[in-house]
Image (cartoon, rainbow, N blue to C red):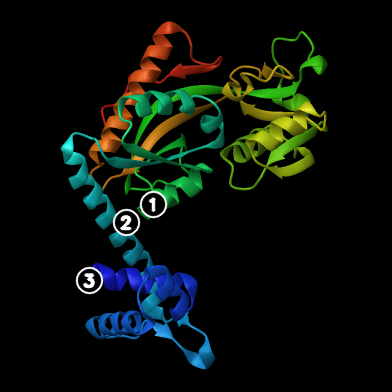
């Protein structure tokens, strides 16, 4: 079994077409078909069904696809790890982060890392924690900044809690009263702007409202972070958001929820079965150093604090 055969197999599986897969692999179609045939002979089972011109995966092909993707991702990581031995002059960090972190603290940490290691490529995937965890497991990311607790305990991941932050009720600045906090029960019947399904904030808001004995009323739902904040600015309703995303938005005010309020933990996650590349180790060190300095200087966003004691991961 060769990596080139696995790459050809994945290309056919993703394009459902031998000609298109050959174009992607930049090989002649007969050569690609020969690689697939050799792989099927090696495994002792057909991987594709070619009935009536349609190319679909057989049960054996469906079983192989996620494994092949992971093996190719690990092989790519190995190549880059060897290249990085020349003093981190080359390499890549594939980082996942939630939208609130992309809009908040992450930019400064990325800028510091890029200044220190200009030859390292930075690839950032913005998504919800559940999707990021899946991408980590599939080998598509090296590190991910996710929200704890995870929806399901994944034994294949190592997580290190690094930050804790408050969730606040965002409303237009001119509509905010002078009250120091708002009770979750007071959101009953108020129009709310709700994130799309799969957002950790959606689940946190729904759970808090249901524990208070009511279902929230949505004025609009389905948005990403920027859209939700803009909808709140326009007066469509209020939203429960992380306090850090209100920095630089003078049109919005955040009112804390009544004690004990709502808080969430932010963690840095990686796969347990794959040692991080040297570039990923360097980014982790840069991120933790930046956060530690910001905490000492008091420049972390309001409502955000360093998780203590820090874990050694």
Of the 4 image quadrants, the one containing the C terminus is top left
> In the displayed structure, does residue 23 sit left or right of residue 6?
right
Whichever of callouts 1 and 3 sits on the residue coming sooner in the sequence is 3
Relative to residue 185, is residue 60 drawn left or right?
A: left
Q: Residue at x 68, y 20 (%)?
A: 249
Q: Earlier in the sequence, mark 2 or mark 1?
A: 2
Mark nearest the camera among 1 and 3 is 3
Q: Residue 223: horizontal and vertical position, in percent?
A: 69, 42
Image height of 29 relative to 271, above or below:
below
Could you say which disc has been placed on residue 73 in the image? 2
**In this rendering, is residue 255 above or below 237?**
above
Task: For marks 3 and 2, give the CA distance.
Answer: 14 Å
Q: Quadrant of residue 291?
A: top left
For label 3, the residue is 2
Nearest to the observer: residue 157 or residue 29: 29
Q: Which residue is drawn at the image coordinates 64% and 35% (left, top)?
A: 225
Q: Quadrant of residue 12?
A: bottom left
Disc assigned to residue 140: 1
């Amino acid at each position: 079994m060769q990596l080139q055969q696995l790459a050809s197999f994945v290309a056919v599986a993703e394009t459902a077409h031998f000609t298109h897969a050959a174009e992607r692999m930049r090989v002649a179609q007969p050569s690609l078909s020969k690689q697939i045939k050799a792989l099927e002979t090696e495994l002792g089972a057909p991987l594709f069904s070619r009935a009536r011109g349609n190319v679909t995966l057989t049960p054996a092909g469906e079983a192989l696809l996620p494994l092949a993707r992971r093996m190719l991702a690990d092989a790519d990581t190995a190549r880059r790890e060897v290249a990085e031995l020349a003093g981190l002059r080359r390499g890549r960090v594939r980082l996942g982060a939630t939208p609130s972190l992309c809009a908040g603290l992450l930019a400064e940490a990325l800028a510091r890392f890029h200044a220190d290691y200009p030859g390292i490529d930075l690839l950032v995937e913005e998504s919800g924690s559940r999707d990021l965890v899946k991408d980590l497991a599939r080998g598509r990311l090296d590190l991910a900044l996710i929200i704890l607790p995870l929806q399901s305990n994944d034994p294949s991941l190592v997580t290190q809690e690094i930050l804790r932050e408050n969730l606040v009720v965002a409303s237009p600045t001119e509509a905010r009263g002078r009250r120091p906090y708002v009770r979750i029960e007071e959101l009953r019947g108020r129009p709310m702007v709700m994130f799309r399904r799969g957002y950790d904030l959606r689940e946190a808001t729904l759970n808090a409202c249901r524990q208070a004995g009511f279902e929230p009323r949505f004025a609009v739902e389905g948005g990403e972070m920027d859209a939700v904040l803009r909808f709140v600015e326009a007066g469509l309703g209020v939203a429960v958001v992380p306090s850090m995303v209100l920095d630089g938005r003078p049109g919005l005010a955040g009112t804390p929820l009544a004690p004990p309020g709502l808080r969430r933990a932010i963690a840095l996650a990686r796969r347990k079965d794959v040692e991080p590349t040297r570039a990923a180790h360097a980014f982790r060190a840069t991120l933790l150093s930046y956060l530690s300095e910001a905490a000492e200087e008091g420049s972390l966003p309001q409502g955000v604090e360093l998780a203590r004691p820090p874990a050694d991961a």
